[in-house]
Image (cartoon, rainbow, N blue to C red):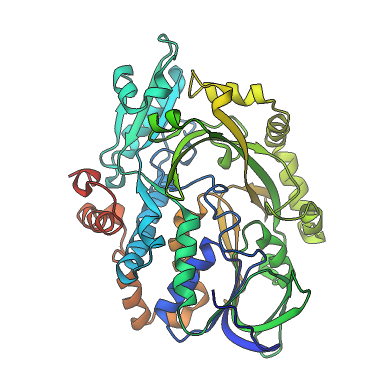
């Protein structure tokens, strides 16, 4: 990639901190909206997409709410709240439109192979869970976004969908499953690198890898001074920018604190690490083809929702189970054990303590996960694959997530599971905090960020027209327009190479 150095006090329009899916998405969108923008990308590692965006680190590879049960909680009255699921499913369709736009416009191999068709399934057992899944299916299929979702309690049908999950299972166990054939598997590492490949070819874009940002300061002229240190040579680089985006995954909180904007005060972070069981038996891998999600244990974080996950990574079928949660004081997989203590400030200490006291079950859950033996992990796997053998699986370290802790007027501090954009009042700097569903909804998140931080241009006729070119459904709700949804899905599936577009759109 282009690594031409800026002069010590060079000025650019935009600095993107972190070379992950969020920065790649924002950079591509901004260059499409205004081609003459100058952009500098600063990344602390030596390659793009090496942290949360990497396929082996990413717990969710195509969050579309088809199978993730934590997006459809049961209300006290027994009804199912599908509002979050609708929002995520709609956002994923927006992402697919932008990816299809890029794939049509640019002949880049990474943009042809990052997404694959794979059924999304939910699987539960026990009378209460079966009843929950039945009600969830009935509620979701009222929305056109979930048209075509099948539900079954018939063991023979479920055996056809997921034979390994049913093989060896107690015949008296009551089970149920849903299947959504429209599901996909997304390699966000490949997608991110594909977008950065496009960015590096554009004029006015420079990349600096192995550069760790150590200082962010607002100058009297309104520009941000960003200081980064080359981790190999120790040399410092300073770049001034009109707008700074902090998209550094778990490292975003620390950088937000360095900016010292009032809007960033009071935020804290709770790191959660993860592990996978990776299948090493090709015969087992070939016999399972689906993303199968179950119900999370009480008190567990969203990234720990158990799933048996077929993936395509570097052109090869893989099968993972997990993730198993753990605790580390690191905010990044390749971060420092001092990340958590270094993030504590006078302004966020109280919210962090209160949130911690209110989430003791979560803490207990993480402690129990850390203490798990190989036999314990195998037993958890056997709930989904009754005939699983230890020799067919090996433990792999997954990514690091930082859940958001924020001030709350009534409760003092709350732990949030999701993503949150924090920006200065004048829109000159913004940071993305949090985790799931993150990458899958990156396009919607970045559209909202652009409209908030680039207000003058964001609603202009020129930018509005470009938004509609990149995202044909821009300004419309697909959930309210089934005909448009079918049209959009048919087009994006065809462009992205997803099989049998007519069947996948439910026609």
Residue 97, picture quadrant? bottom left
Is 3 on the left-hand or right-hand side of 442? right
**Residue plotted at (76% across, 57% down):** 348
Q: Position of residue 257 (x, y in %)?
A: 73, 66
Q: Quadrant of the C terminus?
A: top left
Residue 151, picture quadrant? top left
Q: Position of residue 322 (x, y in %)?
A: 56, 35
For the image shown, how many numbered marks are present on the structure?
0
Is 292 on the left-hand or right-hand side of 93? right
Q: Position of residue 379 (x, y in %)?
A: 59, 21
Residue 261, picture quadrant? bottom right
Q: Nearer the viewer, residue 219 or 408?
A: 219
Residue 458 in view (yes/no)? no
Q: Nearer the viewer, residue 497 or 286?
A: 286
Q: Nearer the viewer, residue 455 or 250?
A: 250
**Residue plotted at (41% across, 17% down):** 167
Q: Is residue 268 above or below residue 398?
A: below
In the displayed image of the protein, which residue is found farthest to the front? 282
Q: Quadrant of the N terminus?
A: bottom right
Q: Is residue 336 above or below residue 452?
A: above
Q: Nearer the viewer, residue 35 or 88?
A: 35
Q: Is residue 480 above or below residue 103?
A: above
Residue 26 in view (yes/no)? yes
Q: Position of residue 98 (x, y in %)?
A: 36, 64
């Amino acid at each position: 990639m282009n690594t031409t150095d800026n002069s010590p006090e060079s000025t650019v329009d935009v600095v993107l901190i972190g070379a992950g899916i969020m920065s790649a998405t924002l950079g591509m969108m901004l260059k499409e909206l205004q081609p003459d923008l100058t952009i500098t990308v600063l990344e602390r590692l030596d390659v793009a997409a090496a942290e949360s965006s990497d396929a082996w680190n990413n717990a969710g590879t195509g969050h579309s709410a088809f199978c993730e049960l934590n997006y459809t909680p049961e209300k006290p009255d027994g009804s199912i709240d599908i509002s979050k699921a609708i929002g995520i499913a709609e956002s994923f369709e927006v992402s697919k439109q932008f990816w299809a736009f890029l794939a049509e416009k640019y002949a880049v191999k990474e943009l042809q192979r990052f997404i694959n068709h794979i059924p999304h399934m939910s699987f539960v057992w026990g009378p209460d869970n079966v009843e929950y899944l039945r009600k969830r299916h009935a509620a979701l299929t009222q929305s056109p976004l979930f048209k075509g979702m099948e539900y079954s309690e018939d063991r023979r049908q479920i055996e056809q969908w997921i034979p390994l999950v049913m093989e060896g299972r107690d015949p008296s166990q009551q089970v149920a499953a849903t299947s959504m054939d429209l599901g996909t598997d997304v390699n966000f590492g490949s997608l991110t690198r594909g977008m950065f490949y496009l960015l590096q070819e554009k004029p006015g874009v420079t990349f600096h890898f192995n550069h760790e940002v150590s200082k962010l300061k607002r100058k009297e002229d309104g520009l941000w001074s960003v200081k980064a240190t080359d981790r190999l040579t120790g040399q410092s680089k300073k770049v001034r920018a009109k707008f700074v985006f902090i998209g550094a995954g778990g490292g975003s909180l620390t950088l937000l604190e360095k900016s010292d904007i009032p809007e960033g005060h009071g935020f804290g972070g709770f790191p959660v690490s993860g592990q996978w069981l990776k299948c090493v038996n090709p015969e087992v891998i070939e016999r399972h083809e689906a993303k199968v999600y179950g119900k999370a244990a009480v008190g567990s974080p969203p990234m720990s929702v158990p799933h048996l996950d077929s993936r395509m990574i570097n052109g090869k079928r893989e099968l993972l189970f997990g993730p198993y949660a753990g605790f580390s004081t690191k905010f990044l997989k390749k971060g420092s054990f001092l990340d958590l203590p270094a993030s504590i400030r006078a302004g966020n200490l109280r919210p962090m303590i209160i949130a911690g006291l209110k989430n003791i079950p979560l803490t207990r859950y993480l402690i129990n996960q850390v203490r798990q033996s190989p036999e314990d992990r195998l037993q958890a796997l056997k709930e989904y694959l009754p005939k699983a053998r230890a020799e067919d699986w090996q433990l792999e370290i997954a990514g690091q997530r930082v859940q958001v802790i924020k001030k709350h007027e009534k409760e003092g501090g709350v732990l949030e599971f999701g993503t949150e954009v924090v920006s200065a009042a004048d829109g000159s700097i913004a940071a993305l905090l949090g985790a799931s569903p993150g990458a899958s909804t990156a396009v919607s998140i970045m559209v909202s960020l652009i409209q908030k931080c680039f207000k003058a241009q964001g609603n202009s006729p020129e930018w509005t027209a470009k938004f509609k070119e990149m995202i044909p459904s821009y300004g419309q709700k697909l959930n309210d327009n089934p005909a448009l949804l079918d049209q959009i899905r048919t087009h994006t599936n065809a462009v992205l190479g997803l099989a049998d577009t007519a069947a996948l759109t439910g026609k």
